């Protein structure tokens, strides 16, 4: 491979020829070479919370702990943690991140970073909406609004954010917990929690999280649905029927394991229907690291080539970066990553597999 040293554009890809052994400037690596990764779902602003919330507490407990724990850190501690997370992701081969934001803390670091960030300012609030505060974040580059989820935003705000024109995708937390679907039927843990604290929802008439999306999001708006732990076949089919553009189904297996001890059950169904699966780490608060390779190790029995597609070109397409990132090809400007620790007899990642950026 020949790469422009300044622009990082791939100029040529050639077959190995032993004459190369004697040529100056040629480097050899053992392992699998791949395009740089795309972390399709992260909250890098929560980097300071790595290890701060114990695993296994469940979805509701995790949600309420995030705000309380974050208040224990100073701005400079938060910035230090964000910088470190950004650097580690880069060294481990991440080229781009779909990053959820609530405030402007992370933007100065992201602007300087070698990683390309698409930031989603998440609108939520059942009593008072943070929509106006989110709008102030639109001054930052590659930043757009998204509703946080189908259970945390009232109807008018959800519809407004989803129908505002622009070419940025939406990134919606979707069916991360069982309670999301149950809420629309007036039962389950989320319904009980909302009743206890007096939250009223003006959107339950949609009947389900999927129906709410179908009736609120235009069919040609690109959308990332994040988590997908409790997908049914009918839900997938209804969404695929509604949208005329690809849906990106982002899986964050280690976060689901960390928070709730669950595995996304939908992988086989999504693969069978040819859905575009992407990989996210979710926030450092609900993960031991922001390593894409560690996420991929969660998917046993799936061909490595397919897994790498989820972590590279699917993620790049989801964020609208498919023209430059996600694929090693002449004219692209993706990073180049070497994965070591591959069992070549089965073409699978071993437990000690790791990724390292070489370009
Ligand atoms: Zn998230």
Image (tube, rainbow, N blue to C red):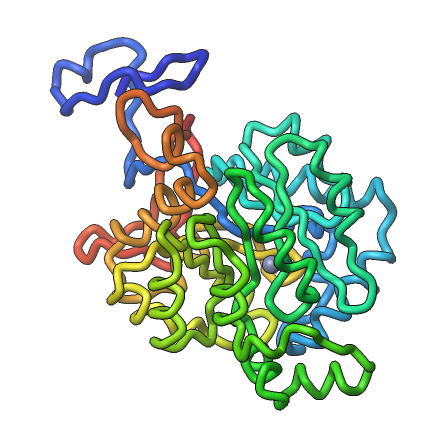
Furthest residue to the top?
24
Q: In this rendering, would 71 be left or right of 63?
A: right
Tell me residue 257's x, y (percent): 53, 71
Which is nearer the eye, 19 or 333?
A: 333
| Residue 337 horizontal/vertical position (percent) | 38, 35
Q: Is residue 337 visible?
A: no
Tally of numbered tags: 0
Along the horizontal axis of the image, is 225 left or right of 289? left
Image x and y of residue 313, in percent: 35, 42
Q: Is residue 297 above or below residue 330?
A: below
Of residues 203 and 6, the one nearer the viewer is: 203
Q: Quadrant of residue 274?
A: bottom left
Residue 271 versus residue 70: which sits nearer the camera?
Answer: 271
- The answer to whether residue 196 is left or right of residue 121 is right
Q: Is residue 181 visible?
A: yes
Residue at coordinates 44% horizontally, 33% vertically from top-left? Answer: 357
**Which is nearer the eye, 4 or 268?**
268
Q: Given the current orientation, which residue lies at the most extreme bottom position? A: 187
Q: Residue at x 64, y 59 (%)?
A: 158
Tell me what residue is drawn at x 36 percent, y 46 percent: 314
Q: Residue 234: give x, y in percent of width and height.
A: 36, 76
Task: Write down which quadrant ligand 1 falls in.
Answer: bottom right
Q: Quadrant of the C terminus?
A: top left
Find residue 336 and report its image quarter: top left
Residue drawn at point x = 49 percent, y = 71 percent: 211
Q: Is residue 130 above or below residue 210?
A: above
Q: Quadrant of the N terminus?
A: top left
């Amino acid at each position: 491979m020949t790469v422009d040293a300044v622009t990082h554009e791939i100029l040529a890809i050639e077959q190995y020829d032993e004459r190369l052994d004697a040529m100056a400037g040629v480097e050899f690596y053992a392992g699998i070479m791949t395009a740089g990764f795309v972390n399709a779902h992260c909250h890098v602003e929560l980097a300071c919370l790595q290890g701060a919330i114990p695993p296994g507490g469940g979805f509701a407990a995790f949600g309420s702990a995030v705000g309380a724990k974050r208040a224990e850190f100073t701005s400079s501690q938060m910035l230090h943690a964000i910088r470190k997370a950004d650097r580690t992701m880069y060294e481990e081969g991440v080229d781009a991140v779909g990053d959820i934001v609530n405030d402007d803390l992370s933007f100065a670091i992201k602007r300087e970073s070698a990683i390309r960030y698409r930031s989603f300012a998440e609108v939520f609030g059942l009593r008072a909406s943070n929509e106006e505060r989110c709008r102030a974040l639109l001054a930052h580059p590659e930043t757009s609004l998204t509703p946080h989820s189908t259970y945390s935003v009232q109807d008018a705000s959800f519809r407004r954010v989803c129908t505002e024109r622009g070419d940025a995708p939406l990134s919606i937390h979707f069916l991360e917990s069982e309670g999301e679907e149950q809420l629309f039927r007036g039962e389950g843990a989320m319904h009980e929690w909302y009743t206890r604290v007096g939250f009223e929802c003006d959107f339950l008439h949609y009947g389900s999280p999927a129906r709410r999306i179908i009736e609120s999001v235009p069919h040609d708006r690109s959308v990332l649905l994040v988590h997908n732990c409790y997908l049914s076949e009918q839900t997938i089919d209804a969404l695929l029927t509604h949208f005329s553009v690809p849906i990106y189904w982002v899986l964050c297996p280690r976060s689901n394991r960390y928070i709730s001890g669950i595995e996304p059950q939908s992988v086989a169904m999504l693969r069978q229907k040819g859905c575009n699966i992407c990989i996210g780490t979710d926030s450092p608060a609900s993960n031991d690291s922001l390593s894409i390779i560690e996420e991929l190790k969660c998917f046993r029995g799936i061909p490595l080539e397919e897994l790498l597609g989820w972590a590279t070109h699917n993620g790049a397409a989801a964020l609208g970066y498919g023209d430059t990132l996600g694929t090693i090809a002449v004219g692209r400007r993706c990073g180049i990553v070497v994965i070591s620790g591959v069992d070549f007899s089965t073409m699978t990642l071993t437990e000690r597999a790791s990724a390292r950026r070489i370009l």
